[in-house]
Amino acid sequence: MQLGDSYSAGNGAGSYTEKSCWRSPNNYGQRVATRQGATYTNAACSGGVLDDILQPRTLGSSSLRTRTYRVPVGAVDARAQWLKQAKADKLCGTPTQRDFSYTYSIRSSASAGRLFTATVRCQLTARPQINSVTTSTDAVFVTIGGNDLAFTTIVTQCLALRSASGCKKAIDSANSKLADMKKRTKATLKAVHDRSGGRADIYLLGYPHLINTTSHKLSSTYDFGKELDLLQRRGDNAQRAAMVELDRTTPGKGGFVFVDVKKDWGGLTHGIDPTPLGADNSNSWLVPVLGVGREYSEWVHPNAAGWGANALALYAAM
């Protein structure tokens, strides 16, 4: 079972089954499950935060659909009858994933005799990721927490815009959220473990080094490389500590494991080259910003080699 964010779902891996959550069969979880000959479900979703594991999440922008249906004259609740027909006709569309559904909400309506016309707002929604966990689940793979620290803002300010002030603000903000992230990680993964009836082992994978150096200045005074390295190490320490504490305090067999993927990535070796001009990313296992032939949602996510490294780290941990 796969839960988590884009570093779980498959961004950068290609061969996507859909592009709302960017799920790919080339992600690390599917690779390990295939090697183990195990049944596997991917409920992870790009942009995911800890709350999305326990709560439903809206995906993308909503859209409007208008349709006219016949309803009985003087119907007590014509709107309800119209809505029933609209859902039966799948007016909003057919979800591509088992855990996706459309939320229908009528925005306006008018009637003329037996004819009732309404406009409905359609919102694609993913059910809580934890709903995919059952008492038959024996292993849960997850990467989560980066977006709780505003990963996208760090990438935008530090790598895309190269704004020293914006980068510092983003990293300082992330550092201030680490303690809360650790606390909520424990509560969330404990809920996942309980949902499995205490049967599942939970493997929390960390993130690779985003850049290939521990020192890179965006200005004469702000060393982005140093501060990012410190943030990532603090993040690993917080998540590792959360798993150790869960393993120690959870009744039964425990089964909470933190998997540090950085060794299998060769440490800093395969991070992105952050130099603004003439960057050489031929050795990077992360899709660079503005990578040729790549979409925005793939930037700074593992390529095939990176997903393979994560799979090796997880397989070894298991």
Image (cartoon, grey):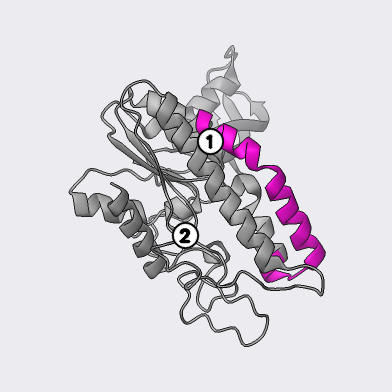
Query: From this viewpoint, is residue 68 visible?
Result: no
| Magenta residue check for 122 | no
Up the image or down, 302 lies above or below 32; here it is below
Mark 1: amino acid: Thr
The residue sitting at 54% across, 68% down in the picture is 295
Quarter of the figure that contains the N terminus: top left
Mark 1: few/some/many CA within 10 Å (<14, 14-19, 20+) = many
Residue position for label 1 = 185
Q: Position of residue 199 (x, y in %)?
A: 29, 27
Asked if disc 2 and disc 1 are in contact, CB closer than 8 Å, the reply is no
* Front position in the image: 147 or 210: 210
Which stretch did the figure color magenta?
A: 158-187
**Structural distance between the alpha carbons of marks 2 and 1:** 22 Å
Up the image or down, 272 lies above or below 123; here it is below
Give whichever of discs 2 and 1 has the lower sequence position: 2
Mark 2: amino acid: Asn
